[in-house]
Image (cartoon, grey):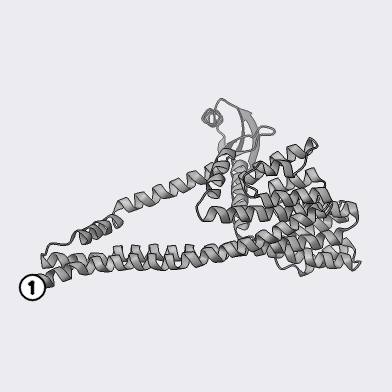
């Protein structure tokens, strides 16, 4: 091995040199035998081989950069549907008014409030300025502009109707946003009520029942069976088995989440969701409305049929719908119609397949799909309202039953003791 060493002579001058030895100790003994005053001995780095200090510094820099990147990704604001709607609507108005694309992008960058959207638009502006088309520049940011957005912009560029396509995109994103908000608003209430019920039951079993248990034990009376069951449940909630249950439940959710990432798992779980008694019909209507709205918007914007079906398949949001659209895509690629494979699928009602068939026959497929989407948007809104109206009394009765059962279980021994006193 080669070592770099420093020695000091009798005058105090430090000399640096390179020597070869089997080890650092062997070199130190050899230099000492010559009467040299050793200052430092270290391994000489080979060409292309970094030293330990350099490796350590590089590792620290990499670790800090990874931490900063992960932290910044967590703190970075997301680009929501509202941001996309505002951008599409304003950019369409600028293009329609004759503002150049570069100038319009520069204006949007200046007035954009979302930091991630601002950075993305600035990068898109610089790409367009360097000669890249708008659709290609947008396609480089799939986390903000999905395939549907890029495909419609590309069709608008090819047909010279970019401002119309951007306006349709804004309308489409607004309709999607309204549909999503309706479904979420309908689900927030039962989830919130269920969470409150669980917290109330946990609080009564954890804090209130132990107080009554001590009081009952001091009375020395025989407790009713229902009260004994509640006390055992309280002990179970406050024991280590409750922690084991929570950990096991978290492991089950983690396993289902990872299984859902696979093709087979996602198809099985999505199929199970569509078969749920009450929520399955709502999810099916949401899926049909989203399919009709997306497909109709793409066809109206001039996107080729096969490309539109590929985009719809990717943005379907349900593996069962994706499988059905894939069958339609294969049929159309072989020269067939859209309505024929849809009529064989039990997922799409006859009304949808008939409307699609009429649209194919009359050449107004986009209009028919838009009418289907409007119809199912209303159906989803009515279903959400009906579901909320149905769940509201059920949730109230459920919470009242839970709290009332615990209260009755706490006061039953008191009634027993009063009867014995009488």
- Other-residue count near label 1 (Cα within 10 Å), few / some / many at <14 / 14–19 / ≥20: few
Total numbered labels: 1
Which residue occupies 67% across, 49% down? 350
The kind of secondary structure element at disc 1 is helix
Q: Position of residue 370 (x, y in %)?
A: 75, 58
Q: Quadrant of the N terminus?
A: top right
13 horizontally vs 369: left or right: left
Residue sticking out furthest to the top: 22
Q: Position of residue 258 (x, y in %)?
A: 53, 43
Image x and y of residue 51, in percent = 62, 38
Res 118 seen here: no
153 up-or-down from 399: above or below:
above
**Residue 229 visible from this viewpoint:** yes
Quarter of the image where one finds residue 121: bottom right
Residue drawn 66% across and 65% down?
A: 178
Q: Nearer the viewer, residue 322 or 66?
A: 322
- As drawn, which residue projects farthest toward the bottom? 422
Q: Is residue 20 above or below residue 246?
A: above
* In front of the other: 226 or 151: 226
**Residue with the mark numbered 1:** 421
| Residue 113, percent from left and from top | 71, 68
Q: Which residue is depicted at the point 73% across and 54% down?
A: 294
Image quadrant in which you'd find residue 412? bottom left
Residue 147 as seen in the image, left or right of residue 185: right
Using the rendered view, name the quadrant where residue 49 is placed: top right
Tell me: residue 136, above or below residue 223: above
What is the quadrant of the C terminus in the image?
Answer: bottom left
């Amino acid at each position: 091995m080669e070592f770099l060493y420093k020695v000091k002579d009798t005058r105090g001058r430090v000399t640096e040199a390179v020597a070869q030895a089997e080890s650092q100790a062997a070199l130190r003994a050899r230099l000492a035998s010559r009467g040299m005053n050793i200052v430092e001995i270290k391994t000489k780095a080979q060409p292309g081989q970094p030293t330990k200090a350099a490796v350590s510094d590089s590792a620290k820099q990499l670790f800090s950069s990874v931490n900063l990147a992960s932290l910044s990704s967590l703190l970075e604001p997301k680009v929501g549907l509202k941001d996309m709607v505002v951008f599409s609507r304003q950019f369409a108005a600028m293009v329609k008014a004759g503002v150049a694309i570069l100038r319009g992008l520069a204006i949007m960058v200046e007035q954009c409030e979302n930091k991630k959207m601002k950075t993305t638009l600035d990068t898109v502006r610089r790409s367009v300025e360097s000669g890249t088309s708008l659709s290609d520049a947008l396609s480089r940011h799939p986390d903000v502009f999905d395939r549907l957005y890029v495909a419609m912009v590309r069709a608008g560029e090819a047909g010279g109707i970019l401002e119309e396509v951007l306006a349709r995109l804004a309308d489409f994103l607004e309709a999607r946003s309204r549909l999503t908000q309706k479904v979420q608003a309908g689900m927030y209430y039962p989830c919130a009520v269920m969470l409150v019920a669980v917290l109330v039951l946990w609080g009564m079993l954890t804090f209130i029942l132990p107080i009554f248990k001590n009081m009952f034990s001091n009375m020395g009376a025989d407790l009713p069976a229902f009260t004994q069951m509640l006390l055992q449940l309280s002990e179970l909630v406050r024991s280590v088995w409750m922690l084991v249950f929570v950990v096991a439940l978290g492991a089950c959710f983690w396993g289902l989440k990872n299984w859902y990432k696979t093709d087979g798992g996602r198809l099985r779980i999505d199929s199970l969701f569509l078969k749920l008694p009450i929520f399955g019909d709502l999810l099916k209507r949401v899926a049909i409305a989203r399919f009709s709205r997306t497909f109709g918007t793409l066809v109206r914007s001039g996107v080729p049929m096969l490309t539109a079906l590929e985009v719809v398949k990717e943005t379907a949001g349900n593996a069962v719908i994706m499988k059905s659209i894939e069958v339609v895509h294969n049929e159309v690629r072989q020269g067939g119609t859209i309505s024929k494979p849809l009529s064989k699928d039990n997922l799409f009602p006859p009304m949808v397949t008939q409307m699609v068939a009429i649209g194919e026959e009359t050449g107004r497929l986009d209009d028919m799909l838009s009418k289907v989407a409007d119809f199912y948007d209303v159906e989803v809104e009515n279903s959400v309202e009906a579901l909320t109206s149905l769940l509201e009394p059920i949730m109230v009765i459920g919470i009242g039953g839970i709290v009332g059962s615990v209260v009755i279980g706490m006061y039953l021994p008191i009634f027993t003791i009063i009867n014995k006193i009488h």
